Image: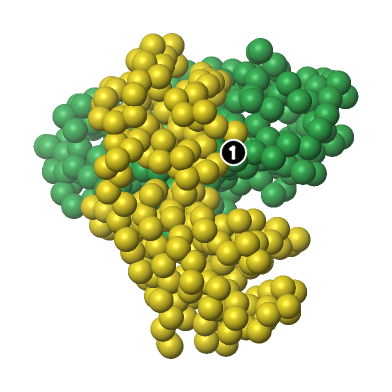
């Protein structure tokens, strides 16, 4: 129901506002709206604000206590949404290469869903994605909008090394590895896009709420 | 004269040479806040209290860069000398072959070699140098984010051949150096004041997490009564605890949400994980608890093979 929320403490270090138990487009918009309103409030004792799939967490400064901010956060959580009509979603195109040396799991997936590799590629390119969350690694986007046929549980055993730039799928999400890392997602292609640059004043290329489509490139 | 000369050499371009890297030595400070929405963890010294103590002993600001060494410490060269202090886990440390005490400020002569040995108990050693380890600040911190390979010194563990810049000394640091070298005696000069070390708690105290109510009776019993052994897969991202598997009364599907250092997750295998400073910023595992913040620093001294016990604070 719009406007519903639940507040919990995370030990003595954080407060989380839960908007829902499940995720849908309405929850997605409310998360972004809530994040904006919390940012705008500029609560001094908050060290960091972390949006996730159905909740937003306020991390306390080391010297602050959850009770210090609980009344103000409660007020904001229960307050009216202000940015729902003005989400200003950025549209981004992500180049993706499906050449054989990058297609590590593409053939396996194609076989298992009973499609040709080109059909799977077409599905990926047809999808209209949105960044639901950034987590797991700096700059790693959880893109929702994965075509249902491609949805699959993560690998039973993770790879020790997933190459940097790998585009991969697991659960209902498509993700991109900004750096080389161990990982349990199924790799379908690769992007040359730099997703995370710690030397930049805007270190992450993608933010929550960005709309993305993939564009095929050949090497 | 000797004192003024010494002051001059300590204020000039100072550096540390890594002669031997040790098992896992990285540059850390108090970590970086404000970037978790981009998946950037806080990182920073795992035993934050000891890192701050070491900085204090040499007259640094609490957030200045230090070296965090793990289990087997590094060998460091100080071509221009330096004022140092070593806190954290207990280890034998020597300068040019001569033992020096930890937890005291020590003024080192030029061209000396500091050898940090193997820990006798605990896990992590903090080496502070007056002026601070002056690597570039990235996203507000000098801490190393090992998972993404940035920050600290080139985003990685230190190794032989690395050279680290040292910042300029504060007036506090210069005062300490003057005091230590005032009688003109041979260096290294050891300050006779020592940082106290509070005892480590015998339990890891935690508050209950969202999925704690779903623990079955046996699971609750295991969590509160069993000794857990720290698994070899533990690192700066988390402590993996082994005992009898802990189960929830039913399967639960959780929408990924923010996690913090100190979050106690229960993965499918029933072996709890206590997340630490380098852990990913979001997670979808059930959360059964949160370590009390004043116990977080102690987690940085727990090593593989140790036994720990948990205490439910409600």
Task: Give above or below for B263 relative to A78.
Answer: below
Q: Nearer the viewer, residue B187 or B240?
A: B240
Q: Quadrant of residue B214?
A: top right
Q: Which corner quadrant holds the N terminus of chain B?
A: top left
Q: Which corner quadrant holds the C terminus of chain B?
A: top right
Residue A58: percent from left, percent from top: 42, 28
In-image side of B249 versus A112 (left or right): right
Residue B88: percent from left, percent from top: 51, 32
Q: Chain of mark 1?
A: A
Q: Residue at x 78, y 37 (%)?
A: B251
Q: Nearer the viewer, residue B179 or B49?
A: B49
Q: Residue at x 45, y 63 (%)?
A: A128
Badge 1 marks a residue whose secondary structure is loop
**Count of numbered badges drawn on the protein:** 1
Task: Give above or below for A99 relative to A74.
Answer: below
Q: Nearer the viewer, residue A187 or A63?
A: A187
Does residue B69 appear in the picture of this structure? no
Visual hue assigned to chain A: yellow
Q: Nearer the viewer, residue A186 or B314?
A: A186
Q: Residue at x 26, y 25 (%)?
A: A41
Badge 1: few (under 14), some or many (20 or more) residues near its Cα, within 10 Å?
A: few
Q: Residue at x 65, y 76 (%)?
A: A105
Visual hue assigned to chain B: green
Residue B52: percent from left, percent from top: 39, 29
Identify residue for label 1.
Answer: A22
């Amino acid at each position: 129901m719009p406007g519903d929320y639940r507040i919990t403490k995370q030990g003595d270090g954080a407060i989380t506002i839960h908007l829902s138990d499940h995720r849908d487009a309405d929850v997605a918009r409310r998360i972004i709206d809530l994040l904006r309103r919390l940012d705008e409030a500029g609560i001094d004792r908050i060290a960091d604000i972390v949006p996730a799939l159905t909740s937003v967490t306020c991390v306390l400064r080391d010297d602050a206590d959850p009770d210090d901010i609980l009344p103000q956060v409660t007020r904001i959580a229960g307050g009216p949404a202000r940015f729902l009509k003005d989400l200003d979603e950025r549209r981004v195109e992500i180049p993706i290469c499906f050449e054989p040396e990058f297609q590590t799991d593409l053939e396996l997936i194609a076989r298992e869903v009973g499609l040709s590799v080109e059909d799977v590629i077409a599905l990926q390119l047809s999808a209209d994605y949105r960044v639901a969350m950034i987590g797991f690694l700096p700059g790693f986007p959880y893109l929702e909008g994965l075509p249902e046929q491609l949805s699959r549980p993560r690998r039973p055993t993770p790879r020790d090394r997933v190459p940097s730039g790998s585009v991969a799928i697991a659960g209902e999400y498509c993700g991109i590895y900004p750096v080389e890392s161990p990982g349990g997602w199924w790799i379908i292609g690769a992007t040359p896009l730099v997703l995370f640059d710690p030397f930049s004043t805007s270190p992450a290329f993608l933010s929550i709420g960005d709309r993305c489509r993939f564009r095929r490139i050949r090497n | 004269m000797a004192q003024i000369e010494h002051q001059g050499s300590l204020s000039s371009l100072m550096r540390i040479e890594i002669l031997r890297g040790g098992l896992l030595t990285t540059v850390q400070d108090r970590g970086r806040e404000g970037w978790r929405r981009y998946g950037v963890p806080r990182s920073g010294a795992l035993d934050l209290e000891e890192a701050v103590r070491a900085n204090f002993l040499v007259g640094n600001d609490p957030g200045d860069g230090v070296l965090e060494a793990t289990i087997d410490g590094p060998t460091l060269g100080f071509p221009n000398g330096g004022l140092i202090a070593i806190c954290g886990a207990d280890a034998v440390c020597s300068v040019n072959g001569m033992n020096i005490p930890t937890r005291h400020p020590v003024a080192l002569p030029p061209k000396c070699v500091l050898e940090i040995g193997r820990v006798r108990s605990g896990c992590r050693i903090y080496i502070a140098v007056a002026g601070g380890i002056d690597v570039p600040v990235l996203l507000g911190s000098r801490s190393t984010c090992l998972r993404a390979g940035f920050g600290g010194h080139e985003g990685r563990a230190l190794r032989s051949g690395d050279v680290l810049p040292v910042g300029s000394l504060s007036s506090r640091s210069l005062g300490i150096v003057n005091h230590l070298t005032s009688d003109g005696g041979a260096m290294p000069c050891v300050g006779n004041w020592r940082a106290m070390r509070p005892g480590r708690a015998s339990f890891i105290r935690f508050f209950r997490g969202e999925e704690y109510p779903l623990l079955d009776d046996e699971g609750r019993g295991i969590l509160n009564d069993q000794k857990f052994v720290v698994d070899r897969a533990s690192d700066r991202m988390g402590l993996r605890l082994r005992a009898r598997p802990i189960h929830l009364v039913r399967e639960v599907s959780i929408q990924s949400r923010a996690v913090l250092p100190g979050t106690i997750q229960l993965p499918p295998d029933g072996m709890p994980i206590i997340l630490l400073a380098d852990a990913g910023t979001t997670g979808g595992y059930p959360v059964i608890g949160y370590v009390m913040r004043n116990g977080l620093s102690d987690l940085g001294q727990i090593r593989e093979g140790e036994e720990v016990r948990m205490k439910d604070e409600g």
